[in-house]
Amino acid sequence: MSLWSNPITMIFLLSSTLSIIAAIFIVYHKSIVYSAFFLSMLGVGNAILFALLGFPIISLFHLSVYVGAAVTFILFSVAMLKEAPSVEPPIKALAVLSVIILTIILIKVLSPFSAEPSFFLNYRELTSLLVTKYWFALIVAAMALMTALIGAITIARREV
Amino acid sequence: MEVFWYLIVSSILFAIGVYGLITKRNIIRMLLSAEVIFNAALLTFLSLASLDAAYGAMGGAIVIIAISLSAAEVGVIVSIAIMMFRMRKTLDVYELRKFKG
């Protein structure tokens, strides 16, 4: 009874259910536009889980950058494309079998980690780590974003 | 909540993403399945990083860089898909074989 009355448990159950149902709909929904919409739902559920783990800044970043920019970009791009039914490869039974085996192996590998999360991310600590230890990764990420922007503009503007 | 339950959720998400990646041939659908796998990987990474206070901030920094790089990756793949749709009028990845040099 105390397990269900705990608000953190309730939020975890709701957000994990939202994430898993959204992931199933991403794979199974007939329309790609709705699949992209459910990807944003998966992002929201995952952001709640990040906040529960003690990373509220990462959660906000995930909501604003991933859900707000990347998924919206996919959504609007997919809305421009005409949906064409493509042939699915006939390997569903094999895929289900391999996925079940994969899940069992993953749960077996990850089962030793069963402690409570004991961390709360400090904004000052995160930013100082980013600009002191990971400054090169930050610059590479910025350059990759700029290159992707230039590449996307070039590909989109080229006349075929 | 123990970290183990978060890891179970991420394992299930990973499995669903792998299933979608195996069984679909539409390039956008494969991208969406790969994004499900990416979300599962982020959840696993942060769950394991939250176990130890010494590594928590490091995990957060790496995840922030990973999320921003994923935005770049999504932009590139969607522009490839749009280009492919313009040239071939299809989104089937088997058609990509004909693009080989």
Image: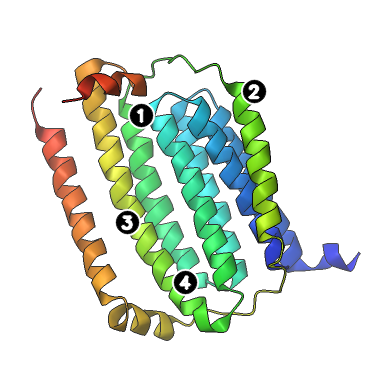
Q: Nearer the viewer, residue B83 or B99?
A: B99
Q: Which residue is mark 2?
A: A93
CA distance separating discs 1 and 2: 31 Å
Q: Do the numbered discs 3 and 2 sit on residues whose CB atoms are within 8 Å?
A: no
Labels 2 and 4 in the same subunit = no
**Residue A40 seen in this snapshot:** no
Residue type highlighted by circle 4: Gly
| Mark 3 or mark 1, whichever is nearer to me | 3
Residue type highlighted by circle 1: Ala
Judging from the image, what secondary structure is the residue with disc 4 in? helix
Q: Which residue is mark 3?
A: B69
| Mark 1 or mark 2, whichever is nearer to me | 2
Residue type highlighted by circle 2: Ala
Labels 3 and 2 in the same subunit = no
Q: Is residue A106 above or below residue B61?
A: above
The disc, 4 or 3, on the residue closer to the chain's N-terminal end is 4
Judging from the image, what secondary structure is the residue with disc 1 in? helix
Residue A140 locus on image (x, y percent): 23, 64
Q: Residues within 10 Å of mark 1 (few under 14, many from 20)?
A: some
CA distance separating discs 3 and 1: 23 Å
Judging from the image, what secondary structure is the residue with disc 3 in? helix
| Mark 1 or mark 4, whichever is nearer to me | 4
Q: Which residue is mark 4?
A: B59
Q: Which residue is mark 1?
A: A79
Judging from the image, what secondary structure is the residue with disc 2 in? helix
Q: Do the numbered discs 4 and 3 sit on residues whose CB atoms are within 8 Å?
A: no
Residue type highlighted by circle 3: Leu
